[in-house]
Amino acid sequence: MDSTQPKRALVTGGSRGIGYAIAQGLLARGYEVIVTARSLAAATQAATMLQSLGSVIPLELEVGSDASIHHAIDALRQHTDSLDVLINNAGVYPDDGVTLLTISRELLASTLNINTLSAVVMTQACLPLLKRSADARVINMASGYGQLAGLSAEVPSYCLSKLALNGVTLMLAQALQPQQIVVNSMCPGWVRTDMGGEAAPRSPEDGADTAIWLAADAPRSASGKFFRDRQEIDW
């Protein structure tokens, strides 16, 4: 990797909410940021809004689709042959009106596909690029709802998907240790976004802070950990 080039970070679901705030923060730190969204129009709109802060590449990427993931990473290779940070931020919260006693298998599977399995496939797809970085990091956007003490039968698919995502973090950290790629989970807290709602006490910038810290400043000795507000928390 050319040391004169800026570090590069890919943020899934980067066109709005916490993902957009992460992109803003990393651009302010001098990173080149790849912003993905389910539509190219949304990604391009976000990139246009962010371009005054630095270099932004918009990508269409549906994290629930292997074909979309691989098409996006193939497109990314036209811009770069390396990646320093992968932030698996895109997710869904589809549990309104259901509990663990009423939720369908289909909804459980759909949420796990987006919130959990996509982090595995994204990491696999980006691995050749990450291996070319001297400081590669993967950050998974989990939740306090994914903590063992935070599970709620009233939020069934989201809780299970984030619990499983924390498991993915532990396993990826182990699998990628030989490549010296750092992998961590984080909880952004309750944030005012389309998902979190207007009543949430935290701004998107508050929710993004730990992700930016994990990407740019956290010690590389911390891998396979779970963080909130830059502090390690229990699984």
Image (spheres, rainbow, N blue to C red):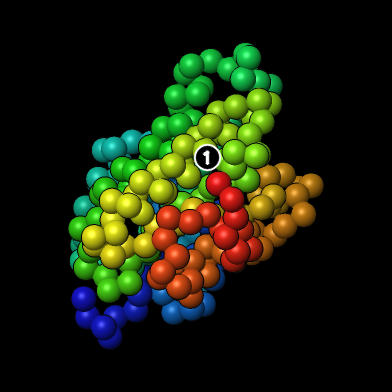
Q: Nearer the viewer, residue 76 or 190?
A: 190
- Asked whether residue 63 appears in the rendered view, the answer is no
Query: Height in image: 153 above or below 26?
Result: above
Query: Height in image: 171 above or below 44?
Result: above
Q: Where is residue 182 in the image (x, y as percent from the top left)?
A: 37, 62
Residue 135 left/right relative to 232: left
Q: Which residue is drawn at 63% across and 45% down?
A: 144
Residue highlighted by disc 1: 162
Q: Nearer the viewer, residue 20 or 229?
A: 229
Query: Height in image: 65 above or below 43?
Result: above
Q: Which of 206 and 100 is in front in this view?
A: 100
Q: Where is residue 120 in the image (x, y as percent from the top left)?
A: 34, 43
* Position of the N terminus by quadrant: bottom left
- Asked whether residue 90 appears in the rendered view, the answer is yes
Residue 69 left/right relative to 154: left
Q: Residue at x 24, y 60 (%)?
A: 178
Q: Where is residue 228 in the image (x, y as percent from the top left)?
A: 61, 58
